[in-house]
Image (spheres, rainbow, N blue to C red):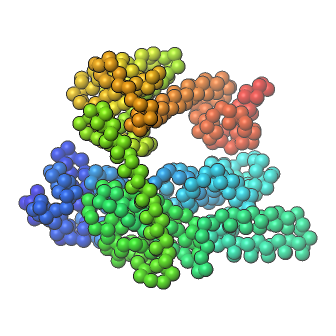
């Protein structure tokens, strides 16, 4: 590799380091590729511990030359997302909170989503109180009557929302695109905190309606004004100056870092994002901040002209150039040293400090529980990653398995997996054996969905289930410790040993395993129920004349279940893609018993 380095050009680009299996384990960018890559091949004593660990696995490299540093930055971001390299920083959102999404259609709609952000729609949030968010959206749609249907399809007559004044019926050409866009613009002003201007406009419209004796219209506007005031009061903080900025604060230790982003619009904090960064191989905060800003704004179209940061990014000028290309505005990224903006940054850092302290206390407690559990069960390593498995079926029908994962004593729901057995069977031993074999075969193939492998396996069951799993693991040559937790007396079982391990019901290690066992049971039962409901649903819809597989799938995708279809009106069923009045009438009549 050192010989190959001599041929690497002194140009901007992206480099990729690979392990002996050809997997990309690190992606980086450089202004001068050869110089940057050479820095990794110095004496191990001069490397940071994390970089040294990575270079011990590197056996090959590749690189891509770009025309500019900005192109290299964009390419690096895309490759990190594509390969998810082991040694790149891992950016995880704190929770899967819902967002408000305003779509980028000709006639946009407002909806609540938890999906991955696309690059064209506008997103607001995240929001922690889902119930309050739903109430707010309901109120917003009364003020701003945008469409709610997923698929805009031309119909012979508008739906009931139009009759109730909750939609302008763009599907029926009841509103021009220009007028619809004015309502969208008003909604955007509100969501971005510009409540005063919106209120002033609405109040003028109400006065005009009153003068023209349009009292019904004036009453609607009065109610809208009151609703806007109520929603406006829900903003978290209001400042004297109408700032438009993001404030990014970062702190942490060697392994983890916490990043908080406060979004100020029109002087009000309208959103807060929380992220945990893991596997940062470079200790310099400047590089970590640069990585975060690239990832955060790559999929975010809501970019203000001013970004305050607690640490200046490594190549600040390049980042500002890149953001200018995205927004066509001059973006300023800086770290204030004094004044009101410094106070705002200090406020963000104070919030970050409180979150960090809370996490440290929780991690310390969990680490102690895991350490004690390792000693109790005589494990060779502290079980940082524990996987628990359970089987669910109904008289042998729709047999499924669940795999839940706890990392550092906390549920890691993104790592949960579920399995549909190849054969329906009322045999938990065989199902567990099939599940574990499929799980570890995928891991040995390099499937990232099943990596890393666990430190401890927990089975919902007793000695029989544990022995069956142990036989499967021995066949695969896997030496991970296995324990079973039986519900009846909350006893732990080891393979081949009939005597149970009985722990105090107050033992925190036992309580952790109980939470895992119950979670695996819930996850398995939920999947089994969904499979059975889906099977039943399809059989019911199969009995409707004129409803083939495409329409059946479209109905289920649109409504989610037969009960929801039964609650829908004829007009709502007609809005489903592929449906016409005749087919919708058949569905409606069949489900209401009027055929």
User: Whole-percent x and y of residue 542?
Assistant: 62, 25
State whether residue 538 appears in this view.
no
Name the quadrant containing residue 166. Answer: bottom right
With respect to residue 232, does 557 lie above or below? above
User: Whole-percent x and y of residue 115?
Assistant: 51, 50
User: Whole-percent x and y of residue 119?
Assistant: 48, 60
With respect to residue 347, does 446 lie above or below? above
Going by the image, does 394 lie left or right of 157?
Answer: left
Instruction: Look at 45% across and 16% down and name the residue there.
Output: 426
Going by the image, does 104 lie left or right of 306?
Answer: right
Looking at the picture, tell me which residue is in the foreground, 392 or 577: 392
Identify the image quadrant of the C terminus: top right
Looking at the picture, tell me which residue is in the foreground, 412 or 198: 412
Identify the image quadrant of the N terminus: bottom left
Looking at the picture, tell me which residue is in the foreground, 46 or 507: 507
Instruction: Look at 50% across and 75% down and name the residue there.
Output: 344
Farthest residue, direction left: 3
Instruction: Look at 31% across and 28% down and name the residue there.
Output: 482
State whether residue 591 appears in this view.
yes
User: Whole-percent x and y of residue 527?
Assistant: 51, 31
Q: How many marks?
A: 0
With respect to residue 372, does 467 lie above or below? above
Farthest residue, direction bottom: 339
Instruction: Look at 46% across and 68% down and name the residue there.
Output: 350
């Amino acid at each position: 590799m050192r010989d190959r380095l001599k041929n690497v050009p002194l140009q901007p680009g992206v480099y990729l380091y690979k392990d002996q299996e050809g997997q990309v384990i690190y992606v980086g960018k450089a202004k001068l590729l050869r110089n940057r890559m050479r820095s990794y091949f110095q004496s191990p004593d001069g490397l940071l511990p994390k970089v040294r660990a990575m270079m011990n696995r590197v056996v090959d490299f590749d690189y891509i030359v770009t025309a500019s540093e900005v192109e290299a930055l964009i390419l690096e971001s895309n490759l990190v997302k594509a390969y998810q390299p082991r040694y790149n920083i891992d950016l995880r959102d704190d929770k899967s909170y819902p967002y408000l999404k305003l779509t980028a259609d000709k006639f946009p709609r407002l909806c609540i989503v938890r999906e991955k952000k696309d690059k064209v729609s506008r997103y607001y949030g995240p929001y922690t109180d889902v119930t309050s968010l739903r109430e707010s959206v309901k109120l917003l749609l009364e003020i701003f009557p945008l469409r709610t249907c997923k698929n805009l399809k031309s119909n012979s007559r508008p739906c009931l929302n139009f009759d109730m004044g909750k939609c302008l019926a763009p599907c029926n050409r009841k509103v021009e695109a220009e007028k619809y866009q004015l309502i969208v613009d008003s909604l955007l002003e509100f969501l971005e905190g510009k409540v005063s201007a919106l209120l002033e406009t609405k109040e003028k419209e109400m006065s005009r309606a009153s003068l023209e004796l349009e009292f019904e219209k004036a009453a609607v506007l009065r109610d809208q004004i009151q609703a806007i005031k109520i929603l406006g009061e829900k903003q978290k903080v209001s400042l004297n100056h109408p700032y438009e900025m993001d404030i990014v604060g970062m702190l942490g230790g060697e392994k983890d870092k916490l990043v908080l982003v406060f979004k100020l619009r029109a002087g009000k904090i309208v959103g807060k994002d929380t992220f945990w960064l893991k596997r940062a191989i470079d200790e310099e905060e400047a590089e970590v901040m640069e990585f975060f800003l690239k990832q955060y704004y790559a999929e975010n179209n809501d970019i203000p002209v001013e970004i305050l940061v607690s640490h200046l990014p490594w190549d600040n000028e390049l980042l500002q150039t890149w953001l200018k290309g995205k927004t066509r505005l001059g973006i300023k990224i800086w770290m204030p040293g004094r004044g009101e903006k410094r106070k705002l940054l200090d406020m963000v850092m104070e919030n970050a400090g409180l979150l960090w302290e809370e996490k440290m206390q929780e991690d310390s407690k969990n680490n102690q529980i895991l350490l004690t559990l390792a000693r109790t069960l005589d494990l060779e390593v502290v079980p940082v990653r524990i996987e628990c498995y359970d089987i669910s079926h109904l008289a042998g029908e729709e047999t499924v398995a669940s795999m839940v994962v706890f990392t550092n004593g906390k549920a890691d729901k993104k790592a949960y997996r579920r399995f549909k057995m190849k054969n329906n069977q009322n045999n938990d031993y065989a199902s567990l054996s099939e599940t574990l074999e499929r799980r570890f075969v995928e891991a040995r193939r390099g499937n990232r969905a099943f990596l890393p492998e666990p430190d401890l396996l927990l089975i919902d069951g007793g000695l029989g289930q544990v022995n069956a799993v142990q036989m499967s693991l021995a066949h695969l040559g896997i030496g991970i410790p296995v324990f079973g937790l039986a519900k009846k007396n909350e006893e732990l079982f080891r393979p081949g040993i009939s005597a149970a391990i009985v722990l105090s019901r107050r033992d925190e290690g036992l309580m952790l395993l109980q939470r895992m066992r119950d979670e695996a049971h819930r996850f398995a039962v939920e999947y089994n129920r969904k499979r059975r409901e889906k099977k039943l649903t399809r059989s019911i819809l199969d009995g409707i004349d004129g409803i083939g597989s495409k329409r059946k799938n479209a109905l289920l995708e649109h409504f989610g279940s037969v009960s929801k279809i039964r609650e829908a009106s004829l007009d709502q069923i007609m809005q489903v893609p592929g449906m016409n009045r005749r087919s919708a009438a058949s569905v409606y009549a069949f489900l209401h018993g009027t055929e």
